[in-house]
Amino acid sequence: MVLMIICNCRNINDTSVREAVKAGARSPEAVQAHFGCQFNCGKCRCAMGEVIAETLDRCAPVLELVAAE
């Protein structure tokens, strides 16, 4: 398995971001807080946001639509 480093300053990878999302993080700041740190340079915010969105999309329940009669 290949890990993609998302935050070089704090050494947070994509798997760690997904773990934080599953624990309730919904923003890059919440991911940082999950690991007990804060942004240093902030260059990872966009990439972290993309991983968060992707993870939430994957975990979203599929709603079954039923036609009303």
Image (tube, grey):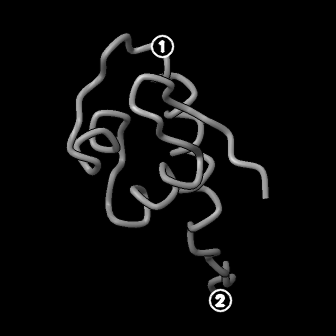
Camera-side residue: 27 or 64?
A: 27
Instruction: Quote the CA–CA distance across marks 2 and 1.
Output: 52 Å
Find the residue positioned furthest to the bottom.
69
Residue 24 percent across, percent down from the top left: 32, 61
On the rendered structure, is 39 left or right of 10? left
Query: Looking at the rendering, in which quadrant would you find the N terminus?
Result: bottom right
Residue drawn at (65%, 62%), measured in percent from left and top?
58
Q: Which residue is mark 2?
A: 69
On the rendered structure, is 33 left or right of 48? left
Quarter of image, res 66: bottom right
Q: Which residue is mark 1?
A: 43
- Above or below 60: residue 37: above
Residue 60 percent across, percent down from the top left: 56, 67
Secondary structure under the numbered disc 1 in the rendered image: loop
Res. 13 mark: none
Residue 20 percent across, percent down from the top left: 39, 56
Tell me which amino acid carries mark 2: Glu
Quarter of image, res 30: top left
Query: Looking at the rendering, in which quadrant would you find the C terminus?
Result: bottom right
Find the residue positioned furthest to the right.
1
Secondary structure under the numbered disc 2 in the rendered image: loop
Residue drawn at (64%, 74%), measured in percent from left and top?
62
- Above or below 54: residue 38: above
